[in-house]
């Protein structure tokens, strides 16, 4: 090995990666991309719109240009095709909800990752005697933001699930832990013969129904209030469970898989979609980091490989399983009854 060719560039880039991350998160918080959706602006005008101090505004905007989040033509700044589509709060394709949550909550909690690694304990509101989910579900504004964040993290995969899964063979589906309804809506939009159900806690119902109505599928999607730990799942042809299993320990994961199997009609299918860790645990960094995020956020949750999930599904009774890549780092594991 020629040590003269080895540099610390990758180490330093990763070690200071939070600089770029926080720059983007602050831009989302400020509504920068939504503002530029109205039209390009020069630095002075953009700083005034966002109420920024002139000292570092230009550096802030140019940093976003260098990071590929803005484009600059002459002296005027504008959105890139990606930020125009996905970070404008006024578009249904907005994915910034998850980034808003990262900025408001996860960014400071990740600062104590080392403590979490040493103790195995969550590093979120639990440390100060709080309960994130209980507090969240008691505050309608925060809950709506969280549910929108779940749509943001799932919508890309939902669109692929709507295309890749053989929906023509089935008539009904239930999205368990449906949140705002991002996944259920994309499936319904893609297949007019389907009738779907979103299952979540009762407080989620108005948010789900409003979103389904807004997207034009309210007549084919209904809400089923329930607690998937305490209640049976509605009988249907297909159950969808996205970003749910990773919240729980192995015993709880198995319980949910067995409940799903029992609720499915003969020949039915369970779709589990997550940021699946690659089977060799070497490539999907996002999936592995998401599992560390479960350490930060939960008492026993962890992410898993496609092979792990296939094994659990077979233990739960599913006869045939398969893994299919989705958008970005996500994948789906399908178990057929």
Image: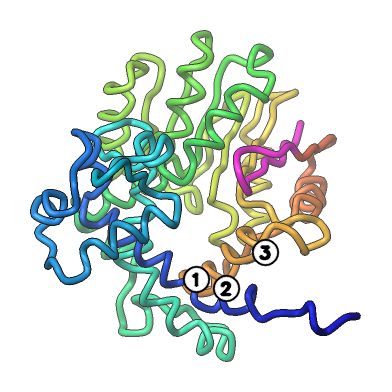
In what element is the residue under mark 3? helix
Near mark 1 (Cα within 10 A), the count class, few <14, some 14-19 or many ≥20, is few
Q: Which of marks 1 and 3 is nearer the N terminus?
A: 1
Residue indicated by mark 1 = 17
Quadrant location of the C terminus in the rendered image: top right
Disc 3/disc 2 C-alpha distance (Å) = 32 Å
**Position above or below: 137 against 321:** below
Residue 306 in the figure: left or right of residue 82? right
At 32% from the left and 41% from the top, the residue drawn is 73
Residue indicated by mark 3 = 250
Q: 202 or 125: nearer the eye?
A: 125
**Position above or below: 57 against 312:** below
Near mark 2 (Cα within 10 A), the count class, few <14, some 14-19 or many ≥20, is few
**Position above or below: 106 against 280:** below
In what element is the residue under mark 2? helix
Q: Position of residue 306 (x, y in %)?
A: 76, 50
Quadrant location of the N terminus in the rendered image: bottom right
Q: Do the residues labelled 1 and 2 touch (CB within 8 Å)?
A: yes
At 24% from the left and 46% from the top, the residue drawn is 75
**Position above or below: 11 against 189:** below
Q: Position of residue 292 (x, y in %)?
A: 57, 71
Of badges 1 and 3, nearer the viewer stands 1
The colour scheme applied to this rendered structure is: rainbow
Residue indicated by mark 2 = 14
Residue 189 in the figure: left or right of residue 91? right
Of badges 3 and 2, nearer the viewer stands 2
User: Magenta region: which residues?
Assistant: 324-337
- Count numbered badges in the picture: 3
At 66% from the left and 47% from the top, the residue drawn is 257
Q: Where is residue 140 in the image (x, y as percent from the top left)?
A: 19, 51
The quadrant in which residue 62 appears is bottom left
């Amino acid at each position: 090995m020629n040590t003269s060719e080895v540099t610390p560039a990758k180490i330093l880039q990763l070690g200071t990666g939070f600089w770029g991350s926080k720059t983007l998160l602050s831009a989302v918080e400020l509504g920068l991309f939504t503002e530029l959706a109205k039209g390009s602006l020069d630095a002075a005008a953009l700083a005034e719109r966002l109420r920024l101090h002139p000292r570092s505004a230009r550096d802030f905007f140019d940093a976003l240009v260098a990071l590929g989040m803005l484009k600059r033509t002459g002296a005027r700044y504008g959105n890139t095709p990606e930020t125009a589509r996905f970070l404008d709060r006024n578009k249904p394709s907005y994915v910034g909800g998850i980034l808003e949550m990262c900025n408001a909550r996860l960014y400071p909690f990740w600062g104590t990752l080392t403590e979490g690694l040493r103790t195995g304990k969550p590093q979120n509101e639990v440390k100060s005697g709080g309960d994130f989910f209980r507090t969240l579900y008691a505050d309608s504004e925060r809950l709506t933001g969280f549910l929108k964040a779940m749509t943001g993290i799932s919508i890309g995969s939902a669109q692929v699930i709507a295309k890749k899964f053989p929906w023509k063979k089935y008539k009904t589906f239930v999205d368990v832990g449906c949140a705002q309804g991002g996944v259920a809506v994309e499936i319904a939009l893609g297949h007019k013969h389907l009738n779907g159900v979103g299952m979540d806690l009762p407080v989620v119902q108005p948010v789900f129904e409003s979103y389904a109505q807004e997207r034009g599928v309210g007549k084919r999607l209904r809400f089923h209030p329930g607690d998937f730990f305490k209640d049976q799942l509605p009988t249907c042809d297909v159950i969808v469970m996205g970003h749910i299993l990773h919240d729980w320990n192995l015993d709880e994961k198995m319980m949910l898989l067995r409940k799903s199997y029992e609720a499915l009609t003969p020949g039915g299918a369970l779709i589990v979609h997550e940021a699946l860790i690659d089977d060799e645990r070497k490539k999907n960094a996002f999936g592995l980091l998401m599992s560390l995020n479960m350490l930060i956020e939960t008492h026993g949750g962890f992410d898993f490989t496609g092979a792990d999930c296939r094994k659990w599904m077979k233990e739960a009774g599913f006869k045939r399983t398969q893994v299919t890549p989705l958008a970005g780092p996500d994948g789906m594991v399908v178990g057929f009854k």
